[in-house]
Image (spheres, rainbow, N blue to C red):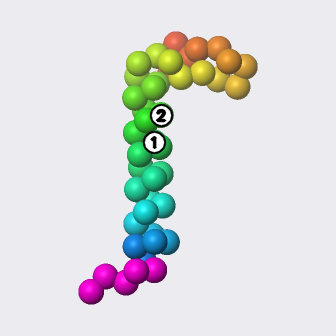
Amino acid sequence: MVNARWLFFGFIPLAVVWIWNLVDFIMAVCGVFKDSEGKVIETW
């Protein structure tokens, strides 16, 4: 049986980080990623 603490403190945060990375990657590939000055990053 899966321990509920592992599910809450392990799997869910890892899933959130994975989704966050996927969104960042898609934004970078589409060319809408911005730097700290608000300029669009065109070459990477």
Image coordinates of residue 19 in percent, x first then y, are: 41, 46
Q: Which residues are magenta?
A: 1-5
Determine whether 11 is above or below 6 in the image.
above
Kindly identify which residue carries mark 1.
21
Where residue 6 sits, quadrant-wise, is bottom left
Q: Say which element carries label 1.
A: helix
In front: 27, or 4?
A: 4
Q: Say which element carries label 2.
A: helix
Determine whether 24 is above or below 34 in the image.
below
In front: 29, or 10?
A: 10
| Discs 1, 2 touching: Cβ within 8 Å | yes
In front: 44, or 28?
A: 28
Q: Residue at x 56, y 17 (%)?
A: 41
Image coordinates of residue 4 in percent, x first then y, are: 40, 80
Image coordinates of residue 36 in percent, x first then y, are: 70, 25
Q: Amino acid at mark 1?
A: Asn
Locate the N terminus and report the quarter of the image it occupies.
bottom left
Image coordinates of residue 32 in percent, x first then y, are: 50, 18
Kindly identify which residue carries mark 2.
24
35 part of magenta stretch: no
Q: Amino acid at mark 2?
A: Asp
Q: Residue at x 47, y 43 (%)?
A: 20
Q: Horizontal placement of 38 versus 32: left or right?
A: right
